[in-house]
Amino acid sequence: MAELEKSYSPQHIEEKWYNLWLERGYFNPDASQGKPYSIVIPPPNVTGSLHMGHALNATLQDILIRWRRMTGHRALWVPGTDHAGIATQNVVERELAREGLDRHRLGREAFIARVWKWKAEYGGRIIHQLKKLGASCDWSRERFTLDEGLSRAVREVFVRLYEDGLIYRDNRLINWCPRCHTALSDLEVEHEELDGLLTFMRYPLEKGQGHIVVATTRPETMLGDTAVAVNPEDGRYRDLIGKTVLLPLTGRSIPIVADSAVDPSFGTGAVKVTPAHDFNDEAIAKRQDPPLPAVSVIDDRGMMTLEAGAVCEGMDRYECRKKVVRELKAAGLIEKEEKHRHSVGHCYRCKTVIEPLSTPQWYVSVKPLAEKAMAAVRDGRIKIVPPSWENTYFSWMENIRDWCISRQIWWGHRIPVWYCQKMENAECTMKKGIIVSRTAPEACPYCGNGELLQDADVLDTWFSSALWPFSTLGWPDETEELRTFYPTSVLVTGFDILFFWVARMIMMGLKFMGDVPFRDVYIHALVRDAKGQKMSKSKGNVVDPLIMIDKYGADAFRFSLAAFAAQGRDVRFSEDRVEGYRFFVNKLWNAARFVMMNAETAGAGNDAPPATGGLAERWIMSRLTLTAEEMNASLEDYRFNDAASSIYQFIWHEFCDWYIEMSKEALYGEGADKRETITCLLSVLDASLGLLHPFMPFVTEEIWQGIRAYRRDAATQSIVMAQFPAPAARDYEAEEEMSYVIEAVTGVRNIRGEMNISPGREVAASIRTFTGDASRTLKDNLPLIRRLARLGEVIIGTDTGRPKGS
RNA sequence: GGGCGGAUAGCUCAGCUGGGAGAGCAAUGCCCUUACAAGGCAUGGGUCACAGGUUCGAUCCCUGUUCCGCCUACCA
């Protein structure tokens, strides 16, 4: 046995073992038998670096995977990264900007090549960081959402959905980010409450005297107004319906129309209608007969167009807003401005204010898919944990709107659609020249023309993510892996991507695999800072997991995260607790030193399980069993914090505080029970390491390797492949008797808080006789405990009629 | 506007299906005792947000109130 340091230092140990695990291929389940258990990792963005959310997410998955692996499962954890369309493109564009370049000057192909180069250089960072955390992913199966296999899956899905009439192209108002220069889905818009101004503007009647006053938060859009709407029930305006007003600054004549969606109590009860730049207004416009025209005054860069009139053309939308207000004021047409708090949509990637624009986009018709996805949760084929999230899931799915999947960026899966440039016959015209194909077509299948143009857009990143559980396993081929590992066992994720990702995976899994993508969805909390604030770079409250790992070791850090992970509640990260768990690692380390030193001097081997030990032995073995039971039950229910608490309590407050203390009597003597005691120490330590390993892979491996010399079963090379201690039979008598010993000594009956109603009065009475009231410290009573432990054994033996010493 | 969650020791938080108020850190005191001073032993500290109700009994169940936080929504 190597001389062990008095304190545990993780620095050199972690990398050593991780490399060994990789070398020996422990994370690859191909050679193992047993029931399949699989998890696909929520693929982090290639641009990402490990943050607390990743760390929590990966730790929980690793605990599950290691635990299942140790309970005889064929455990597969598939890792990978997401190409993260907009995010990655933004990163590389910023890099270009520093070089005085932009992607348009580079051209599409060169730009994409540049992104791949960036990916090769920096994209592996987060993978490296996951390894530092100890994640036992099967890296031989690592995937990237844009690699060849997954791209094939994407095209296949697109074509099939199109053929089933579930993908269509339409020209309507969508959320547009003028900075990223692309359409966004509803989910990609973040709403934020902001202070703004409500401006009351006068629109003079075209004929006769007077005006009507409208209130708006966006005065610049008045240039695109095509009507004023009032509620048909509103007596104030009833006579004006059907009349026209002259739109200031433009001189256009626009009608006053009725629409019941107008709220008479808001503003003036009259609303300006800008169908080209507002979702509500577009709806009002469509309800009119004939529909109102749309006048687009803002372009895709957020600049005012020619339509806006000479005064504003080419101006930024906010500059224009000021100018419009200024001009209207000069004309005496501003009645007043009021402070007004309202919610404004922002791009989730760059925080630019969204501009609703009318553009042609591709959509997935999700209603029919959503129906089935809801049914899968409703009938229990998918279990959401904690179940409170089911409501959220259902309410979103019930109101789901079609999913805009096209993006006007370059980095991503190019939409597999080509347009015939000639449309030379009726069929082709009827199909609008749209060709949807898995591979690039040579010629138009309708009219035979060879002049084709591929759609310039790429797909929403989440489109490929939605296929992740089966695309990573080889779909559309019918692979052995799919047969073995699909559906996956559980999806572990944060609630922030429940809609973005989880719901869509369920829809796609059901559609293309005919089965759910996972049995369970475990939704963990978000990691916040100590004040409960979401961690973000801009707030400067980010805690870097890598710094935590360096400072306290991956084991202590992982254990903290697991202990924080109480269900259904946000995690407020507290560094103090990480430090506390580092002390725990050290405690374990020293307990192991104690056991090994004694095993060494006694020259003991782990000959036989100490089933017939004294009271202390029977007690600790039974408590170990209880701990194993608790941990299995907790992990089964994803109660990570409970599992962590069980093993912590056991190791520290039962094994170290009591059993090790009691063992000294035998160890320091030369009695017959010495060998048995060492055997028990080794055995309990060994099992404790197994229980703890999913939470603390590194220190447990280090110690486990240290006590291998004393192990009977030397075949197992690593704790990674060892058995998770199986619960044996509890020894309730021993637990009960020990509870009296403990009570007598500390005044606290049963340190785990369990109720023991019992007939063993003789023991309790004997203990009181010995104890008296003098001192109650453990230390002072050590000899007493030793005697009592033996006494307990005798008495129990007598009570149960069991032969003494058996 | 709708929905969800939280309010427990100085701080960060556990308390699963009602009957003991708890952990870690911090504080205080005593111990460098042959696994561990990154330790041990002990101590102090909480009308479990507030007001009602159900119950033999409520931190836990019900109702209401007040503060937080989050999700969601096309109020100009």
Image: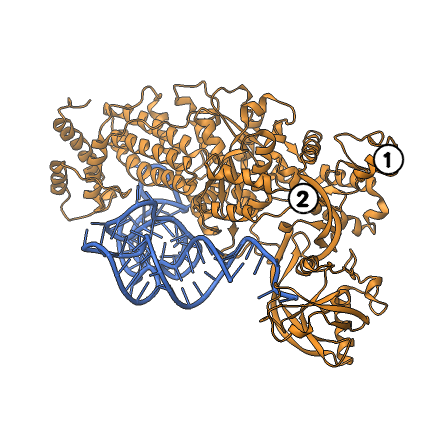
Chain colours: A orange, B blue
Give percent across and percent down for residue A459.
Answer: 71, 41
Determine whether, in the image, residue A613 is placed left or right of residue A374. left
Give percent across and percent down for residue A143.
Answer: 64, 32
Give percent across and percent down for residue A140.
Answer: 62, 27
Q: What chain letter is assigned to the residue under label 1?
A: A
Could you say which quadrant of the image residue A779 lies in?
top left
Could you say which quadrant of the image residue A12 lies in?
top right
Q: Amino acid at mark 1?
A: Asn
Can residue A702 be seen in the rendering of this structure? no
- Disc 1: CA contacts within 10 A as few (<14), some (14-19) or many (>=20): few
Tag 2 and tag 1 share a subunit: yes
Q: What chain letter is assigned to the residue under label 2?
A: A
User: To which residue does mark 1 refer?
Assistant: A425
Secondary structure at numbered mark 2: loop
Q: Which numbered disc flags the more N-terminal residue, 2 or 1?
A: 2
Q: Amino acid at mark 2?
A: Thr
The one nearer the camera, A130 or A473, is: A473
Q: Does the CB distance between marks 2 and 1 fall below 8 Å? A: no
Which quadrant is the N terminus of chain A positioned in?
A: top left
User: To which residue does mark 2 refer?
Assistant: A47
- Disc 2: CA contacts within 10 A as few (<14), some (14-19) or many (>=20): many
